[in-house]
Image: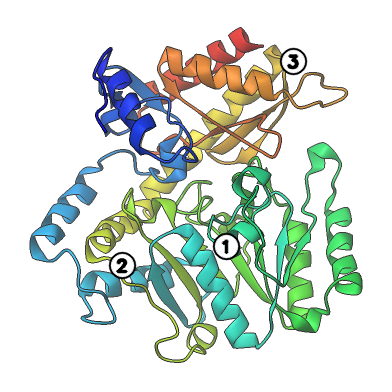
Amino acid sequence: MAVQASGTKTEQLMAKRDAFVARGVALAPIVADHGHGARLTDVDGKEYVDFAGGIGVLNLGHTPDAVVDAIKHQADKMLHSCFPVAAYEPYLEVAQLLCENTPGTHAKKALLINSGAEAVENAVKIARYHTGRDGVITFDRGFHGRTLLTMTLTSKLVYKKGMGPFAPEIYRAPAPYPYRGVTTKDALKGLEFIFKAHVDPQSVACVVLEPVQGEGGFTVMPAEFIEGVMALCEQHGILYVDDEVQSGMGRTGKLWALDHYGLVPDLMTVGKSLAAGMPLAGVIGRAEVMDSVHLGGLGSTYGGNPVACAAAVESIKAIASEAFLAQATAFGEEIMARLNGMAERHQVIGEVRGIGPMAAIELVKDRETREPAADVATATVAGALERGLLLLKTGIYDNVLRILVPITATEEDLELGLDRLEESLAAAA
């Protein structure tokens, strides 16, 4: 099928997209050509400040030099062998770095796979195998992926509409959302009610929770809630799975969001910025739990690909450094200060929230009623694009604007992006 070429290069390529890419894939607003740091340039030469970061994948920014060099070096040596067929050093290096740099001093082991969804799916598999139980507890507004199991865990209709029947033995509990009236006490009572009314806790293998809910609107889980969930898990022999796919790798100012709480999970899922843009994810957990699965029960053809692992070695080392985390903390303070200033000037901002540079604003039509202002969020994103800023919406009501700027951005990048955000918000509101 021929596609007629006309208009700008972007328009020509968008016509090709319409002709050959499945309609269900969300429509990108631009066609990117190249990027570096926090700047992205489209095929027609327009430059953007990137506050999307590939949805949290580019904490190190576009094309970080050390990562690109590692990719080139590994690509010259070997592109693929499948780790269970012929092991290779980069996989072992990544596994060691993850075990050494995740919460807890106990013995740990790691599994590498391709994506965050696969990481969550494998964590559930491991938890079920280890405990001999079937049940899984997930939470309101959580996002854990788009496979059948993780789509079932996910709490947003757009990702599941018309795609059932869903995986069995999944139970959804409330999560705190103080801005909309769901307290920690309410949420913990809701979880206890599930154990009374819907599933015997002795039949539950694990709970899966994001410490900061990504697609849920950057809602931060209070420390007392995570502590309460962990206490219930310990009481009933349930494994606690910490989903750090979006909140990890320095996004909150610490290497992992759970580091802010000083808590240690049984299993942790990681992905997104793990390999600085290459497809790689992992499950890290207590050695006795990870080793409980029989030989051959875990694996993946491409999981832990050597080129992706070479990128991840450099990514982990860079992000775990004191300098990077100090920069992330400083960015977080500056972003939150600017967003709070915007909230004083613009009544459409109902709440500013987040941890460190994982920050967001929730937009409302009225601060008293807190009616979601999804239309203003949509208009702000569109206006930002016109001004040269890539920005993302999130939240159940699509009324939250989230910031996922690369931590390697310059001060000029950050200030320019925040200025364009406020200009776009003012025009939309």
Distance between the Cα atoms at labels 3 and 2?
A: 49 Å
Counting labels gives 3
Disc with the residue nearer the chain's start (3 vs 2): 2
The tag earlier along the polypeptide, 1 or 3, is 1
Circle 3 packing at 10 Å, graded few (<14), some (14-19), many (20+), is some
Residue 211 quadrant: bottom right
Crowding at mark 1 (Cα within 10 Å: few <14, some 14-19, many 20+): some
Is 153 or 274 nearer to us in this picture?
Answer: 153
Q: How is the image coloured?
A: rainbow
Residue 323, compared with residue 229, is above or below; it is: above
| Badge 2 amino acid | Tyr
Q: Is residue 96 left or right of residue 381?
A: left
Where is residue 327, by image quadrant?
Answer: top left
Secondary-structure class at tag 3: loop
**For the N terminus, which image quadrant?**
top left
Residue beneath label 3, please?
347
Please report whichever mark, 2 or 1, sits nearer to the chain's N-terminal start. 1
Residue shown at 65%/29% (left/top)? 361
Amino acid under disc 1: Leu
Residue 336 on image: x %, y %: 59, 30
Q: Is residue 419 above or below residue 363?
A: above
Q: Which mark is residue 302?
A: 2
Residues marked 2 and 1 touching at CB (< 8 Å): no
Residue 1 or residue 420, whichever sits in front = 1
Label 2 vs label 1: CA separation? 20 Å
Picture coordinates of residue 127, whole percent (x, y): 60, 79
Q: What crowding class fits label 2: few (fewer than 14 Cα within 10 Å), some (14-19), or many (20 or more)?
A: some
Tell me the number on the disc at residue 148: 1
Residue at x-position 27% and y-position 26%: 3
